[in-house]
Image: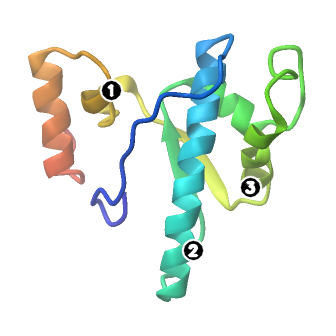
Amino acid sequence: MFNNNVVSWGSVKQKVVTLSTAESEYISVTEGLKSAICFSNLLKNLASNSTFIELSGDNLASLILASHKSNHQASKHIDIKYHFIRNLVAKVVVKVTYVSTKQNISDMLTKVIDGSSLRHLKKLIMNPKEEC
């Protein structure tokens, strides 16, 4: 999102097999970051004053993987190409933040949700600055 407007959205089947939800979400966050970097570079060329990219996710384990450089038992097998996010977080180019499942507007396009949740998420898209 840019200025509370959706500029890009995508859904792609992952090309790798993962061993946990956290690993799958970590790979998704990294793939999303690639698009965000492209948009950020475009904005810089248009003289925007953006200082960092904020990347939100609803899986705390994947956000912790993105924020910590240590290689431990749970992440040592993950392909190195997915770890470049850690360098960008360390350089404060990227800020990873948690978004609760109830506030995650992407869920309306990726998960089966009930009618009241769908209405709530639609309201968030239409009025992103309002608390719903």
Relative side of 125 to 100, left or right: left
In the displayed structure, 123 sits above or below 36; it is above
Q: What residue type is labelled 2?
A: Asn
Residue under circle 1?
110
- What residue lies at 90% left-to-right and 27% top-to-bottom? 71
> In this picture, is 34 found above or below 71?
below
Q: Which of 4 and 129 is in front in this view?
A: 4
Q: How far apart are marks 2 and 1 (CA)?
A: 27 Å
Percent across and percent down for residue 6 are 29, 56
x 30%, y 20%: residue:
111
Which kind of residue does numbered mark 1 sit on? Thr
Please, what is the three-letter code of the amino acid marked with disc 3?
Leu
Q: Are marks 2 and 1 in contact (CB under 8 Å)?
A: no
Q: How far apart are marks 3 and 2 (CA)?
A: 14 Å
Q: Quadrant of residue 14?
A: top right
Q: Is mark 3 on a helix, strand or loop?
A: helix
Q: How crowded is mark 3: few (under 14 residues within 10 Å), some or many (20 or more)?
A: some
**Percent x, y of residue 13:** 48, 28
The circle on residue 79 is: none
Looking at the rendered image, the quarter that the C terminus falls into is top left
Residue 17 on image: x %, y %: 65, 17
| Residue, disc 3 | 88
Residue 127 is situated, as x and y percent measured from the top left of the image, at 16, 51
Residue extending furthest toward the bottom: 47
Q: Please tell me the numbered disc located at residue 41.
A: 2
